[in-house]
Image: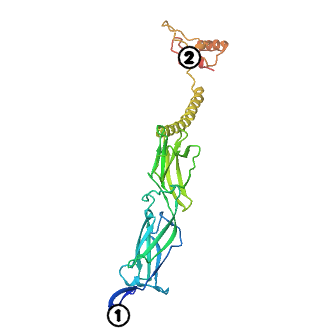
């Protein structure tokens, strides 16, 4: 045979001559240098939750009949093999050659939990065994494959927040994908989370439904934590229960507090003011009552001994008054009819 310099190193053309008594045949055939493909799976467990952005790399090695590895793919623009994954609903694969390290791969890109088609087997079986196969383009009979463990993730069909009210105190959580999950929440006495019976389950083949219900007419805020033990995937769903009088109750509480504070200030101040007024009242004595003025008549000298002159004035003894009158009468040049300039009542 005569190798051709125009061929790739994975195969080469040669000329074959057949001779017979009356026949001579000459033809050209391609001889494959590569007759074996070895595929190695990644060491980690494959999942469709938080998968690597570049996908999972299945290493592909080409070798000849003598067992010598060849790196023919790194010298070409396109890899000399095709890739496919089984079962096909879990994702897709593509051949890729890394020229920097001179290696070839079948890169597996899993579908997200929401994109993953329902599995025909047990929908609660979230663990699958997948196979990635590489086939030589020149000869599909030259093939190699590797098996890997694939764990599906879960997704919440309607993520967000559950708002419960007294008129609608229940709702549902629909989980799809890998339904072998565990649920946790804190307010056990205010909220219940239970799996809906199979006969009432409105989910699809790969979905389950949990019923969330408020147990008391009491506002609360909690979170339902959903965990997938196989991969550690964790999702949280907020749940709020509000009543119609929640805002009013808060406002009334604020007014009540303000009223109590105002009462505590006004009542002691008013009591103190009343006490001060009571203490000031004895010091304010009413003016002494005087006898009513006598009726108009002839002017007469007031009786010094009469108490009407002054209730609190000292009473002058009668003998002393007689003595004063006699002394005045005996005083020379004294005019009896003259107007007196003093009040005998005030004489001591």
**What residue is at 52 percent from the left and 46 percent from the top?**
198
- The quadrant the N terminus occupies is bottom left
Q: Is residue 271 visible?
A: yes
Label 2 with label 1: CB-CB less than 8 Å? no
Q: Is residue 187 above or below residue 107?
A: above
Image position, residue 154 (x, y; %): 49, 57
Q: Is residue 109 above or below residue 168?
A: below
Q: Is residue 343 above or below residue 142?
A: above
Image position, residue 346 (x, y; %): 59, 19
Image position, residue 88 (x, y; %): 43, 64
**What residue is at 65 percent from the left and 13 percent from the top?**
323
The dot on residue 186 is none
Task: Report, in whole angstroms, how far the alpha carbon at label 2 lies from the one at label 1.
Answer: 175 Å
Residue bearing the label numbered 2: 289
Seen as rendered, the residue at the extreme front is 21
- Circle 1: element type: loop
In this picture, residue 288 sits left or right of residue 144 = right
- Circle 2: element type: loop
**Which residue is at the front of the view, 17 or 337?**
17
Residue bearing the label numbered 1: 21
Q: Earlier in the sequence, mark 2 or mark 1?
A: 1
Instruction: Answer with the quarter of the image where residue 17 lies.
Output: bottom left
**What residue is at 57 percent from the left and 24 percent from the top?**
285
Q: Is residue 6 visible?
A: no
**Which residue is at the front of the view, 297 or 31?**
31
């Amino acid at each position: 045979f005569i190798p051709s310099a125009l061929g790739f190193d994975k195969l080469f053309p040669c000329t074959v001559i057949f001779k017979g008594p009356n026949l001579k045949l000459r033809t050209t055939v391609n001889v494959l240098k590569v007759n074996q493909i070895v595929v190695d799976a990644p060491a980690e467990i494959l999942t469709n939750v938080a998968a690597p952005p570049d996908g999972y790399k299945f290493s592909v090695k080409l070798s000849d009949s003598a067992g010598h590895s060849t790196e023919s793919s790194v010298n070409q623009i396109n890899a000399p093999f095709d890739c496919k994954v089984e079962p096909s609903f879990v994702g897709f694969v593509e051949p890729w050659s890394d020229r920097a390290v001179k290696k070839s791969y079948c890169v597996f890109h899993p579908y997200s939990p929401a994109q993953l088609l329902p599995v025909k087997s047990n929908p609660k079986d979230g663990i699958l065994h997948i196979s990635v196969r590489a086939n030589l383009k020149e000869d599909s009979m030259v093939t190699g494959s590797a098996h890997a463990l694939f764990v599906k993730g879960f997704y919440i069909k309607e993520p967000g927040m559950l708002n419960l009210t007294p008129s609608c105190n229940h709702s549902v959580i629909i989980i799809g994908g890998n339904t072998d999950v565990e649920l946790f929440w804190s307010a056990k006495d205010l909220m219940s989370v239970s799996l809906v019976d199979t006969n009432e389950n409105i989910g699809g083949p790969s979905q389950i439904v949990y019923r969330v219900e408020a147990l008391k007419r009491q506002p609360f805020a909690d979170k339902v934590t959903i965990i997938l033990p196989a991969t550690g995937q964790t999702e949280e769903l907020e749940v709020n229960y509000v009543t119609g009088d929640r805002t009013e109750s808060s406002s009334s509480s604020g007014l009540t507090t303000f009223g109590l504070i105002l009462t505590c200030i006004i009542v002691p101040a008013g009591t103190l003011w009343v006490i001060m007024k009571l203490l000031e009242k004895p010091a304010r004595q009413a003016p002494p009552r005087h006898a009513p003025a006598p009726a108009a008549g002839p002017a007469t000298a007031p009786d010094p001994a009469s108490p009407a002159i002054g209730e609190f004035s000292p009473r002058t003894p009668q003998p002393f008054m007689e003595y004063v009158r006699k002394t005045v009468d005996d005083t020379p040049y004294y005019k009896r009819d003259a107007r007196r300039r003093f009040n005998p009542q005030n004489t001591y």
